[in-house]
Image (cartoon, rainbow, N blue to C red):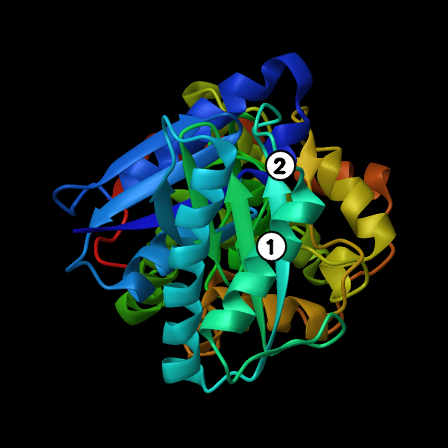
Amino acid sequence: MENIYIVRCGESALKGKNKPYFERMLVQRIKKNLKDEAGVTVERVDGLIFVRTPEEIPQEDVLKRVGRVFGVDSISPAVEVPIEGLDAESALDAIGREAVAFMMKQIESRGIKTFKVDAKRADKTFAIQSPDIGKRIGARVLKGCKVLKVDVHEPDCFLYINVRRNFAYLYDKKIAGYGGLPLGTNGRGMVLLSGGIDSPVATFMMAHRGMYMDAVHFHSYPYTSERAFEKVKELAGILTDYCGRIRMFSINLLPIQEQIVQNCPEEETTILVRRFMMRIAEAIAKREGDLMLITGESLGQVASQTAASLVVTDAAVSLPVMRPLIAMDKTQIMDIARDIGTFETSIQPYEDCCTVFLPKHPVTQPKLERIEASESRLDVEALVSQAVESAELIIISQREGI
């Protein structure tokens, strides 16, 4: 025996001539998320994806794993009714028998009293049209399930019927996925990943648009602890449930911070450090073939995220900087963090490099010429080069059994 799941492609279905490519990528991602389970098959048939699993694999596990694949719009556990070689009347009779059995199970497990039939004739050669399929199967269910009544406005249960070429499928729900685009369809980006709430959410949102994610993490050891670094690796591990494997480059920023504190105005420390972080991230991104930088900044949230500060920060690099959270407030960001499972880890009270040498009164309206004048007191190229060379690569593998 096997369980069957219908997976809908959502946005990928709108890609015109590129649709098969997006669907193939989506099939690959679903297979990868289920790779540790034996006997699973995933196939694409006429715009839908069918996942078949052995009966012993818990349904909730499959729904969770498939639902986290970007590009999946919705999933339906389904019952398959063979109708190959049957005329329309015989096929409808077979569907009707299975529909009665299906609804009896809903009565027993959920105590439903009302239902509505939603029938779709995907195979247009089938001789009975969709409205008539719905009416006739509904009548069959009413006859076979005496406790049920039809309610077309607020039914306890929908009975969906999808009649295709050789099979019909029955299901009662469409479980929403995350949507978006399959990973790998939009290249690779480099995220500046901290231990806070925002940057993990930014990582999730860019992966949601089909981008593979690399990460660079800055620390200030020994001012920041080993436990703070473990926290970031834990966050990256959670993100692999959605993003797949993450290559994380770890860099000790302390030598640069000490040079800035010794040679530059205190109030400019934050913006100067930020510009160095961007330069280092860009150098690694270019070397690794990443197309853009991604940060978790939200406009006006802190001193380094005012409009003027962001303009000055971006002037340090040539790669485009994506800020998917730019117009979101903290409450919205926190809601997403809770939904994807990073929030509880992010709020653990461990320091990060941004809290080291924090000025009492950071500049909020920096002028590029003044910042560049301060940087002229430093050997910027050498400091960036040393930081890039010292980067430690950590591979965060996708977790199994999610």
Say whether residue 277 is visible: no
Amino acid of disc 2: Ile
The residue sitting at 39% across, 61% down in the picture is 235
Residue 225 in the image, given as x and y percentages of width and height: 32, 69
Q: x%, y% of residue 365?
A: 87, 55
Residue 244 in percent (x, y) is at 36, 42
Q: Is residue 346 left or right of residue 376?
A: left
Residue 308, how many percent across, how many down? Answer: 86, 49
Mark closest to the chain's N terminus, 2 or 1? 2
Residues packed near mark 2 inside 10 Å, few (<14), some (14 to 19) or many (20 plus): few
The answer to whether residue 335 is seen in the rendering is: yes
The residue tagged 1 is 136
Pointer 2 residue: 128
Quarter in which the C terminus is drawn = bottom left
User: In percent of the image, x 56 and y 26: which residue is there?
Assistant: 186
Q: Give the crowd class for mark 1: few <14, some 14-19, many >=20 residues within 10 Å.
A: some
Residue 157's quadrant in the figure?
Answer: bottom right
Assess whether mark 1 and mark 2 are in contact (beta carbons under 8 angstroms). Answer: yes
Q: How many marks?
A: 2
The Cα–Cα distance between marks 2 and 1, rounded to whole angstroms, is: 10 Å
Q: Is residue 33 above or below residue 305?
A: above
Q: Is residue 65 left or right of residue 107?
A: left
The amino acid type of the residue labelled 1 equals Arg
**What residue sits 45% from the left and 67% below the top?**
342
Name the one closer to the observer, 276 or 345: 345
